[in-house]
Amino acid sequence: MGITTSQQLQNYFEQFQNAQVTFTRETTKATLLNTKQVFLKCAGSQWPCILYSSSMTSAKVIANVDDSLKGALQKVGNSVQLRYSFLRPEKGIPLSFFVGARVTGFSPYRPENPQLNFLNVEFTQHPPDDLIEILGKLQEAFLNASRRAEYRVLINPDTTKKLGLLPKETGVVVERIPRRCILRDISFSGAKIVIHGVPQFLQNKAAVLRLKFEDPPESIDLMGKIVRFEVIEGRTDISAIAIKFNDDTVPTSYKMRVNSFVRTIRDTTKQQSDDSPESAE
């Protein structure tokens, strides 16, 4: 996935420091948030909580605000430490860290349970580099998925390796019928594949492109529609078809994988430019 430099971390913080990420099921899966190991630490004790959203400067959590937590907060002037935890399958142990913060407000989560509250938490220290990297990559992926939706990644042995893609596991389901296919290119918003079948009969059909990745292992379904086709000269049994993904169903983890590749290409191009004889003059 590449190494994030200190300059890139600084860029992430400057660009996205106040942008809130809501931890939906999609973002939780994409970031590998270890939900069972997130908690508030206050006055030497800890209280389990749900991370509802986070930026690089603040967070919102859901917690059971009982008398013991209220007493602890009052004792220390609302100072807390928020523990983050993210799974790291390749390392075998989670990535966990604390961020010093202060509770600035409460609001009811459910009227029928007055003790269950949203807690607004403002950080009192600069966030760890790990949090900046995780949230920065996520926000960058959202931004580029919008700005560079049509950026095409041609599939070849080099790009396959950089994407962590397992091309032999690629398949497509057209009108609920599974088919084998060859991936030609992908983007944030669509893909082009080669498939058996009469292209005229596939036009405007619903399709689900199934991709498998490694590092970490993951299977991703991309729902969309076949929007156009190209006849392959000399072949009547196969054709190239373009699939337009449904924008609102593209998984966050897919956006992050494509964005990671785009960032790697951009950084490599910049490095080559910096190393060229012209740039040294």
Image (cartoon, helix red, strand yellow):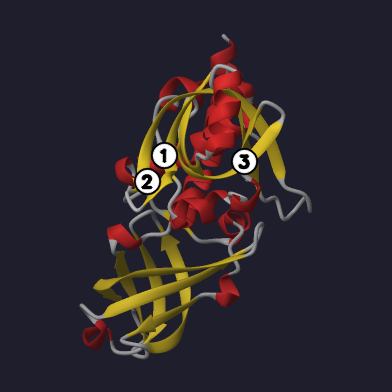
Inter-mark Cα distance, 3 to 1: 14 Å
66 is higher (above) or lower (below) than 31: above
> In the visual, does 14 lie left or right of 192?
right
Task: Write down the residue under mark 3.
Answer: 47
- Amino acid carrying label 2: it is Tyr
Q: Is residue 276 visible?
A: no
- Looking at the image, do the residues carrying marks 1 and 2 touch, with CB atoms under 8 Å apart? yes
User: Which quadrant is the C terminus positioned in?
Assistant: top right
Inter-mark Cα distance, 1 to 2: 6 Å
| Image coords of residue 102 (percent x, y) | 52, 22
Residue extending furthest toward the right: 92
**Residue in the foreground of this view, choosing between 277 and 53:** 53
**Residue in the foreground of this view, choosing between 21 and 223:** 21
161 is higher (above) or lower (below) than 104: below
Badge 3 element: strand
Disc with the residue nearer the chain's start (3 vs 1): 3
Disc with the residue nearer the chain's start (3 vs 2): 3
- Looking at the image, do the residues carrying marks 3 and 1 touch, with CB atoms under 8 Å apart? no
Inter-mark Cα distance, 3 to 2: 17 Å
| Image coords of residue 32 (percent x, y) | 59, 52
Badge 2 element: strand
> In the visual, does 189 lie left or right of 3?
left
| Image coords of residue 259 (percent x, y) | 47, 45
Task: Write down the residue under mark 1.
Answer: 118
| Image coords of residue 60 (percent x, y) | 44, 36
Determine crowd level at label 1: few under 14, some 14-19, many 20+ residues with C-alpha closer than 10 A. Answer: many
Label at residue 109: 2
Q: Is residue 159 visible?
A: yes
